[in-house]
Structures are given as structure tokens and as C-alpha cells.
Amino acid sequence: MASGLFGIARTALLAHQTSLQVVSHNVANAETPGYSRQRPLLSASTPVRMPYGNIGTGVRFDGVERQRDILLDRSFRSASTLLGESNYRRDALSQVEEMFGEPSDAGMAAKLDQFWSSFSELATTPGSLSAKAVVQQRGQQLAQLFSDYDTGLTQSREQATSRLGTTVAQINQLAEQVAELNGRITTSEAGGVVASDLRDRRDLLLDDLSRMAGTRVETQRDGSVSVMLANSTLVDGTSARALRVELDPPTPPPAVTPADVPVKLLLGNSVDRLAPLAGELKAMVDVINTDVPQLRGRLDALASALATAVNSAHSSGYVFTGTTIPGTAAGNFFDPGTVGDPVRAGTLRLSSAIAADPANIASSGDANAPLDNTVATALSGLRNNTTAVSFTGPGGETETAGFNAFFRSTVTRLGLAVRSAEDDVMVRTTLTDQAESRRQSVSGVSTDEELIMLMRVQQSYVAATKLIKTADEMLQTILSLV
């Protein structure tokens, strides 16, 4: 009986000592990112069969259980994927919106109004060289603003492209780390023991991958995971495939080389475009391939229509040298470009004659009337042309509007896109926080709960020591009787 008591006390001491180590490990990692709470597993030892019944033999430490719910992980990662996409899209589009800076006295809407007003002033004093100098200045400012917008869009695209390259490199690095952890976990768990800390490190990497690329995770029987990116396998066991970025020029090449060449993502040795994308990757590719090209396309259409309309009206007029009559036919106000290099936002500029001398600006439509103002009036009237700009969108839809109205429409569309992204961030932040809260309710460490558990295990340990003392006293009593 005494030896039985000693055996039960011994196993109790060892079991509760190990339990104390597990609880202490939880407390120590309460603030460790990605750490999952661990629980000691205790069970009654196999009883001894006696003639008068089964007698218990104490407690058995069965191992450590990692508190983790795979369904809650999937829910969090799904929400995190959408949040990562919305966050980047909001930041990128907000930067472009700040570039336009509307409404502003220095913005495109104000510069267009000033440009048309300068022709109105010229129509009032058609022979004034100073009025023509103002028209020249307003034209230069307008062309420069188009160029600044185009440069800003190029910078935004370059930043997105650079960020995409950095993100792809990070994804490849994370994938390699997941593959390496797969191997370590498989080896560690070969004996049936769960490698909790290694799994925590791997899950933290998988969280990052889901935010960046919207990856999906499938757990295998050997403890490893397979990571799916789009419809392809990024990580399989201890192998990881490299993600890469390549340019994707249109086929066949267009007649006019586009300013924005699309990009595509490929995985491993595949030559097929990776799709569908998700997470930050999707937002970056959308900014590079869709958002910036569409904005640039609208600015290019506005610049081209402006040059065409102004040149058409201006070239119908006449300019005069001193008092020489008749006057000579006026040329283009803006450089008309070429078939291979048409007028765009980035190439809009005054014609060489207008840039050289404001006297070459026409106000008269009559070769024999230097003070005629019909051309200046017609140019001023372009402000009210409601069909000046015709633009065909990516879906084939056609939009027709005046110069100012078309630009306001462009800025409004951008503003709505930014507002939509901001709303998405708010909603998806809430959903992600809720998913993380649910996940933490299972796997997170509560120091209050751990301290309560610590006291319970401590009391059990103390009770086991008292059991040893009692067994010892009983043994001494028996020995004294001999």
C-alpha cells in the first residue's frame, strides 16, 4: 500500500511539475505575436485489477495540446486578404487624387477657365499684343499642367511597380520559410508529438501570405501544409515555387505604343498568367494595369481633343505684321503631333511659332481686317462646346462632354473610387478585427486565466507533496511495529 501511495505521489509530482512548465510557457509568451495557447493533457493512469475491484494508480501526463481552430484561421485570413487589397488601393488612389488637387485655383479646372478667358479678353482687344501674350502664357501653363499630371501618373505607376517587385520578393521569402518549417515540423512530429511553437511560427507566416497574396492553406496528414496561390501551388511540402513579374505587351502591337505596358505574374516555370489574384498583389496589379492607364487615357483624350479643337479654330484665322494687309494664314496653336506620336497629356505643347512670338496668335478671321475678333471669339466659345471630347472606355462605352465637364467627370470618378476604397477599408477592418477577436478567444493567452491555472496546478503539486509525507509517516509507523 505504501509503495502504491509513493508511486501515485511520484506521478502526480511529475505531471503537475510539467503542467507548471506549460502554464509558465503561456505566461511568458502572452505578448508574443502568433503564439497559440497550450494546454497540458492529463488523464488517469491504468488501474490495477484487484480481487475486490480496480484500484487507481495515479495521473498520467499525455502531452500538450495546442489551442487552435483551423476554421477561425481561414475566416481571419479571408478577411485579411480583402483588407490588404483595400488598404493598398486606398493609399495608391489617394496619392493620385492629391496630385490633381481639385478643387484648387492651381488645378486643371481653373487653368482651363483662365485659358478660355484669355481668348475672351483677346476678343475685346483683338489687336493687343499684351492680350496675345496672356493667351500664350495661359496656353503654356495649361500644357505644363497636363505634363505634370502625366508625370505624376508615371511616378505613381513606378511606385506601384517597385512595391509589386518588393512584395513578390517578400512572398518568395515567406514561401521558402514555410517550406523549411514544413520539413522541421514533419521531422519533429514523426514520433506523434505536436511541434506547437514551430506551427505558431508557420501560421504567422501564412497570415502574412494571405494578406499579401490571398493564399489558401491545406493541411496534410504529415503535419505539413500546401499553400495555393490563385489556381497554382506556391508551397508543397518542403518545396516552394518562385513568383515573378514580367511585362505583358499587347499582342499584336498597337499602332501607337501605349505609355503603360501591362504586367503579369507567373509562378515557377509556368508561362501562363497567374489568375485570379487577391490581396495586396491584386490591388497593385490593378493600379498598374487598370487605374493608372485609364486615368492617363482620359487625360490623353482631353489633351488631344483640346489641341484638335483649338488648332482647327486658330488655323482658320490670320495674323498681321505691322499694317501689312492682307494678313497671312495662322498656323496651329498647339503642336499637332504625328501619326506615330499623337498629342497626349505628356506631349501637349505650344507650336513652335506660338511659343516663339505671341504675335503669331490669331484673333481675326478676315485677311483684310486686323481688328476682327471672330477667331478669338470662336476660341473663347470652345468653353461651351458640350461635345468637344469623345472618349471610349475600356468596356466600349462612349462618353461625350465639354472640356471642363470631361475633366470634372474624371476627377469625380477618381474621388468615388477613393471613397469606395475608404469605405471598404472601414468595413473590412471591422470584419478582420472581429475574426481576430474570435481567433484570439481560442488561441490567445489570457494572463488572468493562466494565473488561475497556475494556482490550481500549484495546489495540486503541494497536495502531492503532502501525499508523500503521509505515505512516509505510514511507512514509519509500520516499521516501528516490527
Image (cartoon, rainbow, N blue to C red):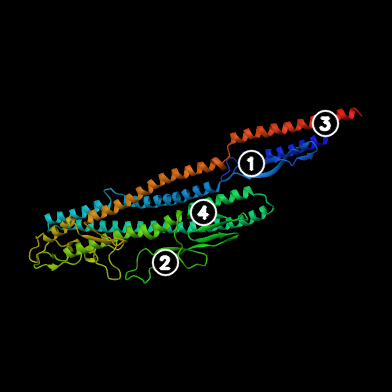
- Categorize mark 4 by other alpha carbons within 10 Å: few (<14), some (14-19), many (20+): many
Instruction: Please name the amino acid that badge 4 sits on.
Output: Leu
- Contact between marks 3 and 2 (CB within 8 A): the answer is no
Can you tell which mark lies on residue 248?
2
Look at the numbered disc 1 and give the secondary structure of its residue.
strand
Q: Position of residue 425 (x, y in %)?
A: 41, 46
Q: Quadrant of residue 182?
A: bottom right
Which label's residue is closer to the chain start, 4 or 3?
4
| Disc nearer the start of the sequence (1/4) | 1
- The answer for how far apart the CA atoms under marks 4 and 3 are is 59 Å
Where's the C terminus, which quadrant? top right
* Quarter of the figure with residue 397: bottom left
Rendered image: mark on residue 472: 3
Residue contact at pointers 4 and 2, CB within 8 angstroms? no
Q: Disc 1 versus disc 4: distance between alpha carbons?
A: 28 Å
Instruction: Indicate the position of residue 259 as horizontal and vertical percent values.
Output: 35, 64
Foreground tag (4 vs 3): 3
Query: Is there a contact, CB below 8 Å, between mark 1 and mark 4?
Result: no
Q: Quadrant of the N terminus?
A: top right
Q: What x and y, as percent, mark residue 469? A: 79, 30
Report crowding for label 2: few under 14, some 14 to 19, many 20 or more residues within 10 A (C-alpha).
few
The percent coordinates of residue 122 (x first, y second) are 14, 56
